[in-house]
Image (cartoon, rainbow, N blue to C red):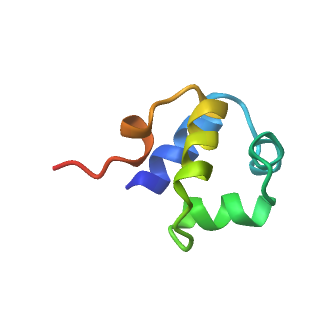
Amino acid sequence: MANARIKAARVARGLTQTELANLVGVTRQTIGAIEKGDYNPTIQLCIGICRALGKTLDELFWEGD
């Protein structure tokens, strides 16, 4: 769910996993793992991803009903 929103937001911004990783200071593998749901990012990393993608924490990470 959240991982699909992250990937969709990244693609909508025209960014590759590598480009997003460079913007937030992690590896491409970390972004890939987040998008696959294999890695639970820290709040700091979540904030960095949100800033890079122009989204809020709620838009990308909130698991609502």
- As drawn, the residue found furthest toward the front would be 44
**In which quadrant will I find the N terminus?**
bottom left
Horizontal arrangement in the rendering, residue 50 relative to residue 4 (left or right): right
Q: Residue at x 63, y 68 (%)?
A: 33
From the top left corner, tell me how far across and down residue 16 is, in percent. Answer: 77, 44
From the top left corner, tell me how far across and down residue 36 is, in percent. Answer: 55, 66
Q: Is residue 42 above or below residue 16?
A: below
Horizontal arrangement in the rendering, residue 8 relative to residue 57 (left or right): right
Q: Residue at x 77, y 49 (%)?
A: 21
From the top left corner, tell me how far across and down residue 10 is, in percent. Answer: 63, 38
Horizontal arrangement in the rendering, residue 37 relative to residue 44 (left or right): left
Q: Quadrant of residue 19?
A: top right
Q: How many marks?
A: 0
Q: Is residue 38 above or below residue 58?
A: below
Q: Residue at x 68, y 58 (%)?
A: 31
Q: Quadrant of residue 9?
A: top right
- Pick the residue in front: 24 or 18: 24
- As drawn, the residue found furthest toward the bottom would be 38
Q: Quadrant of residue 15?
A: top right
Q: Is residue 39 above or below residue 19?
A: below
- Pick the residue in front: 45 or 62: 45
From the top left corner, tell me how far across and down residue 6 is, in percent. Answer: 53, 46
Q: Residue at x 58, y 62 (%)?
A: 34
Horizontal arrangement in the rendering, residue 33 relative to residue 56 (left or right): right
